[in-house]
Image: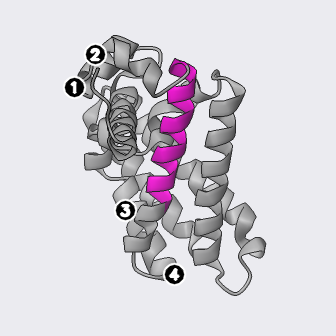
Amino acid sequence: MVRYAKEHKEVTRQRIIQKAGQRFKQDGIDGSGVSTLMSDAGLTNGAFYAHFASKDDLVANVVAAELRAQVEAYDTLRPGRQGLEDLIRQYLSPEHRDHPGVGCPSAALLDEIGRCGDATRQAYTDGAKAIVDEIAARLTPEDPRSARGKAVGLYTMMVGTLQLSRALSDQSFADEVLEQGIENGLAFLR
């Protein structure tokens, strides 16, 4: 029997989480079976339980990792409100809309996350709070708590706008929704 170093196991676990995140956002949580997820990671089904207690355990870990990565990506934005303007334009872009597998987990999975177990919903809650806190800190750095309501409004507007644009079959209407969403998002910054 081959024994792997602890670091190898963690690298493998992170690969599974990363690949599962892409697959979940592309095909949905319910549309992604364990065998497909493990195949995406280049592993056999049997290896799954060495890393996760259940698919629900994997989903909770994926949601936490996806939202953590989203918050960490905000560090690459310009400071303050300029960074929020960049975020709004990137988030509500046709590129983001058309490539859900590499985009925001909220817009791709929100309806399914609401039906998941407590661990996944808690991971989502923690991540959503971190995103709202980041937005609020950029809106009013001197007093982020005062901007929390506005931050919640901006976040929910962006997610809903992207979801609606993805659902439309009329490309010009879908583009119009994104463009209006950008205008609405920029209004939050005024």
Give the Cα distance between marks 4 and 3. 15 Å
Compared with residue 22, is residue 129 higher up or lower down, i.e. above or below? Answer: below
Q: Earlier in the sequence, mark 3 or mark 1?
A: 1
Q: Which residue is mark 4?
A: 80
In the rendering, at what x and y percent does residue 143 appear?
74, 82
Q: Which element type, helix, strand or loop, lies under badge 4?
A: helix
Q: Nearer the viewer, mark 3 or mark 2?
A: 2
What separation in Å lies between label 3 and label 1 (alpha carbons)? 35 Å
What stretch of residues is rendered in magenta?
A: 54-71
User: Disc 2 residue type?
Assistant: Thr
Q: Position of residue 15 (x, y in %)?
A: 32, 38
Q: Nearer the viewer, mark 4 or mark 3?
A: 4
Q: Residue at x 36, y 45 (%)?
A: 103
Is 83 situated above or below 153? below
Q: Quadrant of the C terminus?
A: bottom right
SS of the residue under disc 3: helix
User: Residue 174 vs residue 152: left or right?
Assistant: left
The amino acid sitting under disc 3 is Arg
The kind of residue tagged 1 is Gly
- Secondary structure under badge 1? loop
Residue occupied by mark 1: 42
